[in-house]
Image (tube, rainbow, N blue to C red):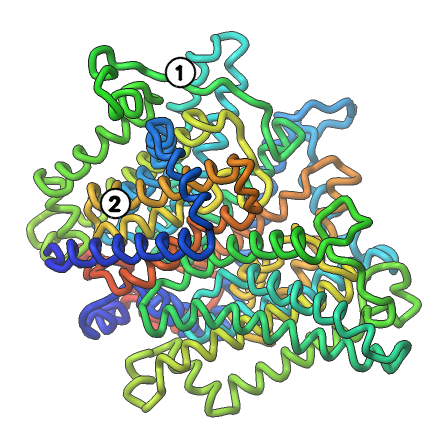
Amino acid sequence: MRNPSTPVVAGAVGGVLVLLAAVFFTFVVPVDWMVALYDQLDTSLLSAALRLTVPIAFAAIGGIFAEKSGVINIGLEGLLIVSAFTSIAVAWALQEPMGAQTAAWIGFTVAVLASTLFAGLFAVVTIRYEADQIIAGLAVWLVALGVGPFASQIVWESVNSPAVPTLGNLVVPGLVEIPVLGPAVFDSNPTVYMMLGAVPLSWYVINRTAFGRWMRASGENPKALDTAGVNVGRVRYASVLLSGLFSGIGGAGLALGQVGQFIGSGQTMVSGRGWIGITAYLMGNYNPVGAFLSSFLFAGLNALQIRVQQIAELDIPPSLVQMLPFVAVIVVLAIVGKTRIPDAAGDHYESGDD
Amino acid sequence: MSADDAEDASGSRSIPEWSESAASRIITASAKERIFISFAAFVASILVGSVLVYLSGLVVACEGTSLFFGSCYDPFQVYYYLFVDPFIGGFNVALVMKEAVLLLFTGLSVAVAFRAGLFNIGSQGQLVVGGLASALAVLFTAPLAPGGVAGTLVLVPLALVVGATFGGVFAAIPGALKAYADANEVITTIMLNFVAANLAFFLVGTYFQDPNSGSVETRSIPAYSQLEPILPFFEGAPFSVVALVLGLGLVGGLYYLLANTAFGYDLRTSGVQPAAADYGGVAAKRLVVSSMTLSGALAGIGGAVYVLMVMGRYRTGVPALGFDGITVSILAGNNPLGVVPSALLFGVMKAGSLSIDFSLGVPKQLVGVLRGLVILFVAMPEFFRMLARYTSFGPDERTVAADGGDGDA
């Protein structure tokens, strides 16, 4: 079931990215810039990269659950938008009576529920009403892209919200003393720990539990699963809801773990992270660990990009560096190319017995 | 289920095949059924939109005494301003026409890719690239070209050709990546939208900035190279009949291309049944690249028209015409002729969104919501089939059964 060439592909991708970076820094960016850039590689960059990984990795994990079960959920971007908006709206509304931190946690929870509900709608549309998964996924994205700014206008009379306090960092005593890794990882936003926990957990669920087995069967050979007496529809509903749950954590993690505001202009604050998440799990070959590492790669590039903008002596136009993560996604997609997606993914399954 | 089984038989499935199977299912529906689905999807979106508007009206605070069942927003009034108000007065009609004409180009762009089994979500980026290139082309050749009418006759076609070329080349990138590297075009085109926006911002801001302007934009192109309203009825609004004629000409041309040429036949076959097209001798990879290029060229012309007719220069922050084009195309059943009423409908809504915002205080972003809802409902024909079965409206059962309705009629 697992593609034997995964390490080779991952290695090749890594190699090419390193090569591209080498070419970029040798010919495009002069050597003294590299020194300035090297100074940026510190623990706070690592910590920023981890924070930026949260929305991408959670979207990626969510996407794995849905697609493994046979439902391609390309609406992850939309789920992130819905969750990001809801988390800020609730946290903003409750911060007066409840205090900022309590309000933020309630906002976080409600946002995950909202995203799960929205994913449930997508599930009904694709499973019950046999909608085309790709078009329905695009619709989920476009509906969220419309509802986010619309609702923002209704609540705040602007497409952007006022600032809201983010979830406070959680310091793990003892572990934070570890050099380099300690301050980068163990003095982090709670959503970072959630991510570090969710990666092995989802790997375990997919590969070592009965539900994981059903899920994979539902994506590879639904008829066999049906014959074995397991309800394919129910497995798919559960998997799509899980993709909503994970994306919900990702979107709320972006809004309340990082930005502290809802930004609804243009492509909203999510700005492509859901799509990058899809690329991350394709690159990670549907393995949560691989997906996390790929997400970290894209997020690391983004963190570096943000850093580079702040180095005054470099004076690189920000719009040029901002392109970097998006170009990287295209390069990765071109290299990863044909991945082996679950056999029945994208197809509606109808049980013979109704 | 039979249709799905047939697809399974084609062996190993891959990401690129997502779109092929998806496109084929929509294309194979009969024309009558497609019109019914589009109509029903639109009505359903309007209904869901009314609920949203009503609920939003409960949240916002308003001074008014005439509440609609406790809500500040009266859905009937909102839809009056959205659909009827845009037709009152020449200026309003011209605004409708301006939006509709622009949507003709992006709608056609998405439609032609869709017919080839490709999702071009990147019309937005192609429009940006084509628009910027055409503005720059006019700015740089204007000093060499004659003025007056002769200048118009030189510069306008030049802008359109440059826009088409750059939009086409920009779309050829995801086309080639899909054909030769199996990179999923949904994601690459979306990423390229971001790249296009950033690239345009960088180029204009760094090299082509209008020194007398506070916003990031190029200098304005000469007046004689702009598409001005010719008919006095539309005076004052950025709408040109020339652009409308051009758009309708492309509709006709594309319809002819798809229906009556070998290229069109290959393109349609690839969209419906890629394996059969391959067997029939279609050079599949080259067709992917050429249909994406054609799609991008149409979006690029849209960008050029946006520059020539609306802005008179390139300014960053181009409205989401490309995303609207997706809905226009899907509502039109991806048929070039269907794009005309579909673009008109969306043109009305885009113009109407300004009046609901101005007159009623309802955010104009409502149209963005409807744009998504329409796609959602068009994607679920089964919903309307079930509805039709209960209500005995809609297409007759035979059409339903013919479309893989599983014999439960």
Closer to the camera in the image, B74 or B254: B254
For label 2, the residue is A291
Q: Does the image show residue B400?
A: no
User: Quarter-wise, where is residue B306 in the image?
Assistant: bottom right
Q: Quadrant where the C terminus of chain B lies?
A: bottom left
- Whichever of labels 1 and 2 marks the residue nearer the N terminus, that label is 1
Closer to the camera in the image, A137 or B289: B289
User: Quarter-wise, where is residue B390 in the image?
Assistant: bottom left
What element does badge 1 sit on? loop
Q: Residue at x 28, y 71 (%)?
A: B3
Q: Quadrant where the N terminus of chain B lies?
A: bottom left
Q: Residues within 10 Å of mark 1 (few under 14, many from 20)?
A: some
Question: Three-letter amino acid code at disc 1?
Answer: Gly
For label 1, the residue is A168
Residue A197, image x, y percentages? 22, 28
Residue B52, image x, y percentages? 58, 37
Q: Does the image show residue B66?
A: yes
Please tell me how many numbered marks the rendered image carries.
Answer: 2
Q: Residue at x 80, y 60 (%)?
A: B220
Closer to the camera in the image, B325 or B338: B325
Q: Is residue B80 above or below residue B175?
A: above
Q: Label 1 vs label 2: CA separation?
A: 27 Å
Image side of residue B126 versus residue A118, left or right: right
Chain letter belonging to callout 1: A
